[in-house]
Image (tube, grey):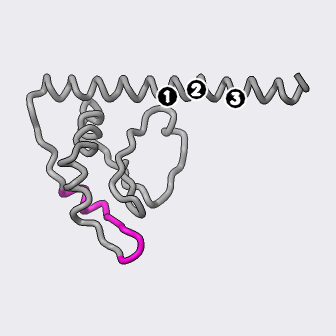
C-alpha cells in the first residue's frame, strides 16, 4: 500500500497483522501480479528512485495527493529473478519479524494491564 494523501507515497507492506483491518480511502492498494515479488515491489517503492517516481505526480495546494493511476504508471524494474527473489525474501522476513515483535509487545501490555487491574 501507499499513502495517497498528506505525507504522500509512504509504502506499507501489508502482512498478516494488517490483513484483518479495513483501512482508509487515503491508501492506494497495490496488488502485484505475483505475490512472490510483493516484497521486491515494496523495496523498490521505498528506494530513492521509487520515492521520486511516486512523488512526481502529487498535487494539492494544502494537502498533497496522488491517485492510483499515478502509481499504476510507475515502471518497476525487472532484474534477474534470483535477485528479485532474494530481495523479496528479505523484506518478507523483516515484516514477519516486525509482526512477531508487535505480538510480543501487545502480549506484554495485556499482561501489565491484567496486573494493574488486580492491584499488583
Residue at the extreme bottom = 61
Q: Residue at x 29, y 33 (%)?
A: 39
Which residue appears farthest toward the right when viewing the image? Answer: 119
The x, y position of residue 8, in whole percent, is: 36, 59
> Which residue is label 3 attached to?
109
Q: Secondary structure at mark 1?
A: helix
Say whether residue 116 is left or right of residue 23: right
The chief SS type of the magenta part is loop
Question: Residue 99, labelled with which disc?
Answer: 1
Element type where label 3 sits in the image: helix
Image height of 75 relative to 65, above or below: above
The correct choice, above or below, for 106 with respect to 76 in the image is above
Is 117 one of the magenta-colored residues? no
Q: Badge 2: few (under 14), some or many (20 or more) residues near its Cα, within 10 Å?
A: few
Q: Position of residue 16 (x, y in %)?
A: 47, 32
Describe residue 114's horizontal placement relative to residue 7 as left or right: right
Magenta stretch, residue numbers: 61-73
Q: Position of residue 93 (x, y in %)?
A: 36, 23
Mark 2 — residue? Answer: 103
Please report the residue visible at 36 percent of the width from the left and 68 percent of the height from the top. 64
Q: Is-magenta flag for residue 65?
A: yes
Q: Residue at x 67, y 24 (%)?
A: 108
Proximity of marks 2 and 1: CB atoms separated by less than 8 Å: yes
User: Would residue 89 appear left or right of 14 to someone viewing this image?
Assistant: left
Amino acid at each position: 500500500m501507499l499513502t495517497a494523501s498528506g505525507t504522500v507515497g509512504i509504502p506499507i507492506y501489508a502482512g498478516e497483522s494488517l490483513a484483518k483491518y479495513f483501512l482508509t480511502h487515503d491508501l492506494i492498494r497495490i496488488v502485484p501480479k505475483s505475490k512472490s515479488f510483493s516484497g521486491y515491489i515494496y523495496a523498490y517503492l521505498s528506494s530513492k528512485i521509487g520515492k521520486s517516481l511516486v512523488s512526481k505526480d502529487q498535487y494539492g495546494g494544502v494537502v498533497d495527493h496522488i491517485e492510483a493511476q499515478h502509481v499504476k504508471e510507475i515502471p518497476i524494474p525487472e532484474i534477474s529473478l534470483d535477485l528479485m527473489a532474494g530481495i523479496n525474501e528479505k523484506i518478507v522476513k523483516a515484516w514477519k519479524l516486525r509482526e512477531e515483535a508487535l505480538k510480543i509487545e501487545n502480549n506484554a501490555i495485556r499482561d501489565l494491564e491484567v496486573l494493574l487491574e488486580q492491584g499488583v
